[in-house]
Image (cartoon, rainbow, N blue to C red):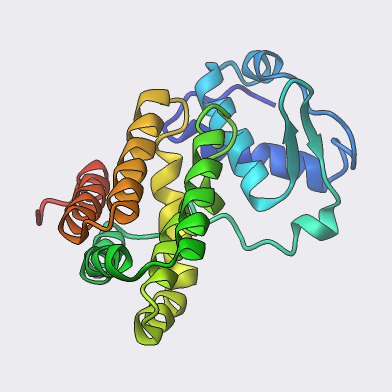
């Protein structure tokens, strides 16, 4: 195998490792080489290796254990996951979704601050705590924790139409969120900024300050759009 020196190295490396797993070169339960070993093998830096490993984790081909390494999972289990969608969204589709989310979630944050029960607040807090824990894990993009945070806020509005609209968008929302969070891999400061934005939203909801909750959510979604290059804001 020849080393690669092209753009989107992480996608190329991901495809190569995926094929090696599917063909049995890396068998079920086998530990993958370390980042340094893979970087040497592909003749690249550790950054695209880290991104490729994260993609393999997200689609279920491997399991990353902190301090132990990455291990191949059962292929039949991995194949139940959707095909990795990083980069499949057009910019326009991403921006349209985020614009729709702003219409829905900014008001939902305000309603949450006004209506949330103690039980609902605990669910939001748990999702925030889960997201905080993954910020120190360089292999985890935090998709589940991030989605759960926004979902808990939506559910706390106790408005069935808002909840159903959010649920109808789940598939495209998760894919777009995954795309966005991937951009923060290897950038601890960016991940901390996202956590801080979530934390501000949480505290506004906890203190039942609806105007602050709306503003915090608005800023959070605007920052995401700016990160992705949306020039409509």
Residue 122 image offset from top left, x and y in percent: 51, 55
- Determine whether 163 is above or below 21 in the image: below
Residue 42 shown left or right of residue 174 in the figure: right
Q: Give the x, y percent position of residue 125.
A: 48, 49
Q: Quadrant of the N terminus?
A: top right
| Rendered residue at 52%/16% (across/down) | 45
Residue at x 29% of width, y 62% of height: 113
Expressed as whole percent of the image width and height from the top left, the position of residue 156 reads 41, 69
Q: Is residue 30 left or right of residue 124?
A: right
Q: How many tags in the picture? A: 0
Relative to 151, residue 68 above or below: above
Where residue 41 appears, as percent x and y from the top left, is: 68, 18
Q: Of residues 56 and 221, which is closer to you in this image?
A: 221
Q: Which residue: 52% across, 42% down?
A: 129
Q: Nearer the viewer, residue 18 or 149?
A: 149
Residue farthest along the bottom direction in this orientation: 161
Q: Which of 31 and 221 is in front in this view?
A: 221
Q: Is residue 88 visible?
A: no
Relative to residue 94, is residue 55 depicted above or below? Answer: above
85 with respect to 108 (left or right): right
> From the viewer's perspective, is 40 left or right of 220?
right
Q: Is residue 28 visible?
A: yes
Using the image as rendered, state which of residue 97 and residue 135 is in the foreground. Answer: 135
State whether residue 150 is above or below residue 196. Answer: below
Q: Residue at x 82, y 40 (%)?
A: 72
Residue 92: quarter of image: bottom left
């Amino acid at each position: 195998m020849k080393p690669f020196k092209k753009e989107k190295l992480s996608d190329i490396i991901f495809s190569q490792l995926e094929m090696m797993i599917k063909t049995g070169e890396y068998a079920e339960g086998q530990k993958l080489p370390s980042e340094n070993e893979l970087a040497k093998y592909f003749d690249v830096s550790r950054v695209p290796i880290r991104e490729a490993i994260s993609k393999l984790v997200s689609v279920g081909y491997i399991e990353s254990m902190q301090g132990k390494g990455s291990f191949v999972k059962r292929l039949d289990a991995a194949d139940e996951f959707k095909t990795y969608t990083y980069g499949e969204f057009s910019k326009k589709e991403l921006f349209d979704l985020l614009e729709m989310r702003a219409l829905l979630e900014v008001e939902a944050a305000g309603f949450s601050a006004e209506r949330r029960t103690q039980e609902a607040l605990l669910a939001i807090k748990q999702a925030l705590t889960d997201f905080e824990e993954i910020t120190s894990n360089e292999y985890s993009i935090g998709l589940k924790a991030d989605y759960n945070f926004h979902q808990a806020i939506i559910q706390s509005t106790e408005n069935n139409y808002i909840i159903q609209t959010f649920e109808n968008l789940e598939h495209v929302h998760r894919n777009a969120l995954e795309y966005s969070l991937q951009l923060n891999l290897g950038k601890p400061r960016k991940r901390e900024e996202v956590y801080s934005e979530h934390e501000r939203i949480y505290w506004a909801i906890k203190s039942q300050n609806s105007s602050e909750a709306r503003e915090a959510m608005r800023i959070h979604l605007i920052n995401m759009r700016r990160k992705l290059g949306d020039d409509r804001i």
